[in-house]
């Protein structure tokens, strides 16, 4: 029951992250400098949620670990895009951006722990 509850919480949390990212980018003026970063951010944040849904339906432990590795990778990518976007946004948007950066960093740690515990970690995760 605890595992199922954790899975559901993480599914909800990753989906909420993707939704929060979409709301965030809607309120940022798109410029030549940031348009590709924002598009990539939307894609990578959605990919975290989508791949965790896939991981939850994995056919094997190896498949589960692989999907979680993709989630970790997409979390890192989301964090990068947020950090780049932060350089060009108004100061009043910093807090919202920083919260999203923090959430992506927490996902990196969570997925790293899941991968490590699965026994399929063949590299060192660097948050």
Image (tube, rainbow, N blue to C red):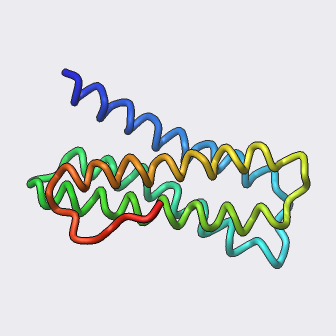
Give the farthest residue toward the bottom: 32
Q: How many numbered marks are there? A: 0
Residue at image location 33% in from the left, 31% down from the top:
8
**Does 123 sit left or right of 62 as displayed?**
right
Give percent across and percent down for residue 69: 31, 62
Give the farthest residue toward the top: 1
Q: Nearer the viewer, residue 108 or 89?
A: 108
Give percent across and percent down for residue 4: 23, 28
The quarter holding residue 36 reads: bottom right
Tell me: residue 20, above or below residue 40.
above
Give the farthest residue toward the left: 60
The quarter holding residue 29 reads: bottom right
Q: Nearer the viewer, residue 98 or 70?
A: 98
Residue at image location 59% in from the left, 60% down from the top:
79
Q: Nearer the viewer, residue 102 or 92?
A: 102
**Location of the N terminus (image quadrant):** top left
Residue at image location 27% in from the left, 59% down from the top:
67
Residue at image location 72% in from the left, 69% down from the top:
84
Tell me: residue 18, above or below residue 126.
above
Give percent across and percent down for residue 123: 28, 71
């Amino acid at each position: 029951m605890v595992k199922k509850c954790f899975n559901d919480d993480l599914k909800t949390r990753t989906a909420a992250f993707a939704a929060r990212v979409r709301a965030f980018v809607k309120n940022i003026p798109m410029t030549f400098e940031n348009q590709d970063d924002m598009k990539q951010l939307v894609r990578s944040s959605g990919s975290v949620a989508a791949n965790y849904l896939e991981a939850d339906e994995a056919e094997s432990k190896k498949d589960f670990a692989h999907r979680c590795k993709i989630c970790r990778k997409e979390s890192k990518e989301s964090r990068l895009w947020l950090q780049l976007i932060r350089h060009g946004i108004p100061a009043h948007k910093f807090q919202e951006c920083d919260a999203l950066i923090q959430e992506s960093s927490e996902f990196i740690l969570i997925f790293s722990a899941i991968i490590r515990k699965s026994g399929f970690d063949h590299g060192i995760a660097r948050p």
